Image: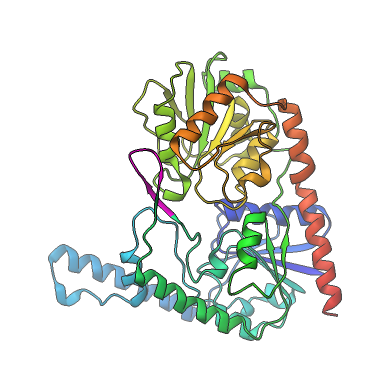
Amino acid sequence: MKILLVNTYDNGGAANACIRLHQGLLNQGVASKLLLLHKTKDIEKSFLFKKNPETNNRSRSYYFKRIQQKIAKKWNLPFLKPRLSKEEVFLKSRAAGLELFSSPYSKYDITNSPLYQEADIINLHWVAGFLDHESFFKKNKKPVIWTLHDMHPFTGGEHYVEMIHGIDDQGMPVKRNVLDIEKSYSKENLDYIINSLELFKSLSIVAPSKWLQCEASKSELFKTRKVHLIPNGLDVNTFKNRDKTFARELYSIPLHKKVILFVADSISNNRKGYVYLKRALEKLDQEDVILCSIGKGKPVLESDIEVRHLGSISDERIISLVYSLADAFVIPSLMDNLPNTVLESLLCGTPVIGFPVGGIPDMIEHGKNGLLATEVSVDSLKEALEYYLLNGVAYSKEEIRTLAVEKYDQSVQAKTYLKLFQEIHFKNN
């Protein structure tokens, strides 16, 4: 039985989850291969999708269009400005800070790949910009398992249907105003996806979190299909509780300080909720706290709390050192699936504090391995931080890690997927 995993990228949260599954399957002796549209890493049994000449010509026309736009803007030549497509007009209308929106169209034909042709089962992952729904599901004759990493496969374009956009003066969430053009364009795309999938029967859905499982099950696209629940897995030998004293010395952080860790690619992404953590820390009356952060943007606090920004870190062993030096990891996300960062923190024995949203409650046992704020607000997050700094949690670092290993070891995920693959393969032969 040959399995082909398909993902657009080999970096980012969804890509990491996909790669970890692939590695877990290989460790179980499964003939797994990974097909990528963009490949930057040397991953065992991973392959770059080979684009045909026609695709390359289209890519060149795209760059010519970009050059034309720059010339028109620089020299103020309106006649050179190309007309915006319907999608471009739509994307320009969306509010800043919203999560990605991707259309269900692509210039690539995955079924042309020799890796596709030799596979018995296709396991789609995060395939925005890679999968062309209509051509793929029309040509494909193989059973497909679609692993959801966000809401995109069943929304008509939005990767997360965000209900919150902004924060008011009292630290409470502001309801998002969804524009008519957003509603109509999403519906148009969703109708296209529904028509593309209407006649395709051999499709199974996997969600890593109970929240995403529920959202997919009640969606227009997947309401008649079974949605399996299989949490993500990690390499428990990479993410583990490392020596706190050594880790603190490495980054010159005093042992007597309380370290709050925050991890995000972008602090300007509305969904990541950094502004809630910022305001909560600014209201915190604690002198011995340090905010330690990993990511591209450096957090800025208007308070006496020290900020140690470590920048972007790609080496997972170094990341596990940072989790190990922290007293708590805070994830202020307003919507999320089953964040890798929470799993990584728990495997390193570090408690997690977050809002009761998405898949975060799947992982946090309130008061034991972390804390859940009572609601999405600055004050509730501040209260959770204060409680933790005063009382901690019931479980020790060792107990937090042991619980996480039992649930999220890479082998647990791989064995569950293997069972599903075998059931589907047997049904189709």
The residue that appears at 64% across and 45% down in the rendered structure is 361
Which quadrant holds the C terminus? Answer: bottom right
Q: Is residue 48 above or below residue 193?
A: above
Q: Residue at x 76, y 37 (%)?
A: 403
> Measured from the top left, where is residue 237 in percent x and y?
74, 38
In the image, taking residue 282 as reference, residue 79 lies left or right, namely left
427 relative position to 410: left or right: right
Location of the N terminus by quadrant is: bottom right
The reply to whether residue 94 is visible in this rendering is yes
Name the residue nearer the viewer: 211 or 81. 211
In x, y percent, where is residue 27? 80, 52
186 and 142: which is toward the camera: 186
Residue at the image point whose x is 54% and y is 78% from the top: 193
Span colored in magenta? 164-173
Q: Position of residue 329 (x, y in %)?
A: 57, 33
With respect to residue 266, does 70 lie above or below? below
Image coordinates for residue 202, horizontal then vertical, percent: 73, 78
Residue in the foreground of this view, choosing between 381 and 337 = 381
Q: Does the magenta segment cover residue 46?
A: no
